[in-house]
Amino acid sequence: MADTCGQVLLGSGLTILSHPLMYIKVLVQVGHEPLPPSLGRNLFGRQVYQLPGLFAYAKHIIKIDGKAGLFNGLAPRLCAGTIGTLVHSRVLQRCQDAGKYEVSGTSQKAEEGSLQHVVNETTKEMIARSCATIVTHPFHVITLRCMVQFIGRETKYSGVFDSIVTVYKNEGVLGFFAGLIPRLLGDVLSLWICNMLAHLINTYAIDDSMSHTGEIKNCSQAVTGFLASMLTYPFVLVSNLMAVNDCGLAGGLPPYASIYPTWVDCWRHLSLEGNMSRGNSLFFRKLPVGKTYAIDQKRFL
């Protein structure tokens, strides 16, 4: 119980610190580009036109809503984080207990570090994460909509309880789970890619006789986690767009977004436009040639 409380407190602190980053990322994902591009240099020193980065975007939000504006949607996100941590911890403990019961009834146990052991642990983690994601997704939807309100200056979603009532009145129960399927798929794929790649690296590329083997394995886990998140980013993007799609906010309606019947249609539309990585980076945002942006409809070439 003490460990869970510690995780909740730590998670809440990290959530508060990272919230402005997520806020700006969501606005970029939706396609909100309120500032004109500027001439800058890329990583190779060449002059290119770039879209505003993290700090320029943050200054724009502060100019309009003040510093507190960077924390729009924080309350439902904290609720999601707290509930998600509790659900994840409880379900994972149940899975671990069930695993111990099954092992006690058999003579064989998967050796730690073996492929079977990795598969067993990943399966338990997948179940725990999926349960936490499903339970907290309504708060995730409300968080995104509170953020996207910045675009049209709406106040439709003003608090956690009021937002719950608003979603239920307008969309029913299904409205709380908009964008859930791509989010679940992305989480599951990311977890398996991360753990399987880490197992391959730790088994075939790292010698146990090497010094600092533990640190190297932890590093490989971090690297594979980053790679997995990059590969599954399109699922995150599609999930977030579907969560605000056609919800009555300007950011979920044309010209920002088409009305997508399903998340597959959203995926196809983004793929055709070459926007599957939109919002993936908040630094060195190169201006795509010939793209039209929703705020002023100017075409930058």
Image (tube, helix red, strand yellow):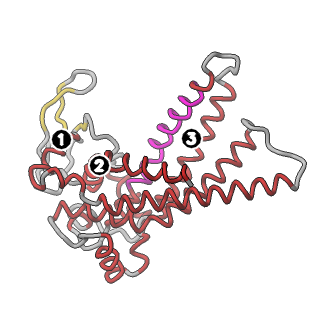
Residue 28 placement, left or right of 199: left
- Provide the residue designation for mark 2: 25
Main secondary structure type of the part rendered in magenta: helix
Q: Which residues are magenta?
A: 216-237
In the rendered structure, does residue 225 fall within the stretch colored magenta? yes
| Distance in Å between CA atoms under marks 2 and 1 | 12 Å
Label 2 environment density (alpha carbons within 10 Å; few <14, some 14–19, many ≥20): many
Indicate the position of residue 74 as horizontal and vertical percent values: 30, 58
Residue 38 placement, left or right of 24: left
- Provide the residue designation for mark 1: 52
Q: Residue at x 12, y 52 (%)?
A: 66
Q: Residue at x 52, y 57 (%)?
A: 185
In the rendered structure, does residue 99 fall within the stretch colored magenta? no
Mark 1 is on which residue type? Answer: Pro
Q: Residue at x 44, y 41 (%)?
A: 230
Whichever of callouts 2 and 3 sits on the residue coming sooner in the sequence is: 2
Q: Can residue 54 be seen at all in this image of the molecule? A: yes
